[in-house]
Amino acid sequence: MDKPNESSARIAVHGAGSIGCWVGGCWAAAGLDVTLIGRERVGREIMENGLTLTDSGGARIELRPDEIRFSTRPDDLAGADIVALCVKSTGTEAAAAEIARHAPKATVISFQNGVSNVDLLKDKLPEANVLRGMVPFNVAALGNGRWHKGVAGTLWVEDDPVTRDLAERIGNRPGRLKLSDDMVAVLWGKLLINLNNAVNALSGKTLLEQLEDRNYRRIFAATQIEGLEILKAAGIVPAKTGPISPQLMPHVIGAPNFIFRPLVLKRQKIDANARSSMADDFAAGRPTEIDYLNGEIVKLARKLGRRAPINEEIVNLVRQAEAGVDKMWGAEELRAHLLEGHRAAPGFGY
Ligand SMILES: NC(=O)c1ccc[n+]([C@@H]2O[C@H](COP(=O)([O-])OP(=O)(O)OC[C@H]3O[C@@H](n4cnc5c(N)ncnc54)[C@H](OP(=O)(O)O)[C@@H]3O)[C@@H](O)[C@H]2O)c1
């Protein structure tokens, strides 16, 4: 590993899990001054094995335990110039309280899913420079100190003097940054893709099995169409963050298998065992990020005096699962429940 550059900003990765370990590890390997702040279990794993970071393009970074600074103590946030916030959205409020106590004037970059974490952070951290970030790829924890980035893609962050300097220091290495001056559009673009997380979790199937079934895809497409309508009414134009524009996405996703398979499934190398992180939350009995995914569409609709019934019902079903209702939904059953009982999306023959 390069020696940390003495003049570089001190970075704390708050919430060293899948994203935090991958991003923080890449930045440490690029020679930046990084402290990972996370749980005892993760710290022990790293101290026993070091960090091995791989990606689908064949990149491999290996850091020995003595090349990584890991802490379980929030007071190690003190002195950080930059806090990369990587806790789940359900942990934002608690993390914000810790940052307020130990690094109230830092630049805080939220790398979390959802669109409203930054509003909460700005409210709780009035003296901080709070910026939006977005992670367009998946990172899986493989155990024994190994984290794997399974999809191509570059981290997005809000353009700001601090992130411009950070991007320059990272250069073209893994963990590099793409700057944007319209991160709100970027976050909404990503959220539309993430609307499948709940459908996948409710299906109980792997991502591959679920996406191969057009009935599940029709539900996913319908949540996107509803989301696009609400965004249009709010005057928000979601950005294209993947290979297909947000407006075209539901058409491709809802298309018959002979179109969808070669266009999407064959190109996106989805791991045979992969499931959405919400499916993992169900399995672990943890609260999900549903309020920050489909729930954001429901909230925006209400703000406009409208409703988003399909996303609303998905939020209800996820809530039931969180409360312990152990029901996995077959594709036809879920499609009938969500789309026949509610408003059919126009033009798609749902
Ligand atoms: N994983 C992905 O592929 C992926 C891709 C794109 C975006 N994202 C988004 O990135 C965010 C992070 O996801 P993730 O998958 O990296 O989550 P994760 O693996 O659960 O990592 C978060 C870690 O932070 C810990 N933590 C929570 N609050 C903390 C605190 N106050 N101090 C120290 N540690 C704390 C958590 O411990 P506990 O479990 O004990 O709370 C957990 O170990 C989410 O918003 C997610 O939606 C994830």
Image: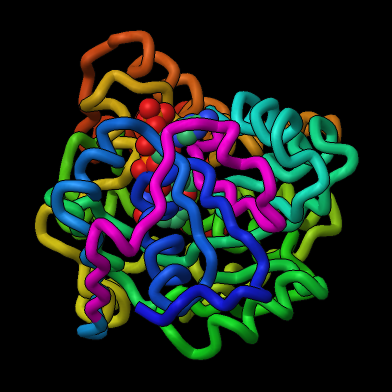
The N terminus - image quarter: bottom left
In the rendered image, residue 79, in percent from the top left (x then y), is placed at 69, 48
In the image, 270 versus 129, the foreground residue is: 129
Q: Is residue 111 left or right of residue 288?
A: right
Above or below, 324 against 327 in this view is above
Residue lying furthest bottom: 172
Residue 341 visible somewhere in the drawing: yes
Residue 342 visible somewhere in the drawing: no
Q: Is residue 74 left or right of residue 174?
A: right
Residue lying furthest right: 127
In the rendered image, residue 282, in percent from the top left (x then y), is placed at 28, 26
In the image, 153 versus 223, the foreground residue is: 153
In the rendered image, residue 2, in percent from the top left (x then y), is placed at 41, 81
Q: Residue at x 49, y 53 (%)?
A: 35
Q: Is residue 172 left or right of residue 281?
A: right
Q: Residue at x 71, y 56 (%)?
A: 81
Above or below, 78 against 239 in this view is above
Q: Which residues are magenta?
A: 60-89
Above or below, 163 against 171 in this view is above
Quarter-of-image position of residue 25: bottom left
Above or below, 194 against 8 in this view is above
Residue 69 lies in the magenta-colored region = yes
Residue 313 lies in the magenta-colored region = no
Q: Residue at x 49, y 90 (%)?
A: 172
In the image, 200 versus 279, the foreground residue is: 279
Q: Residue at x 30, y 67 (%)?
A: 149
In the rendered image, residue 17, in percent from the top left (x then y), is placed at 37, 45
Q: Quadrant of ligand 1?
A: top left
Q: Is residue 219 left or right of residue 281?
A: right
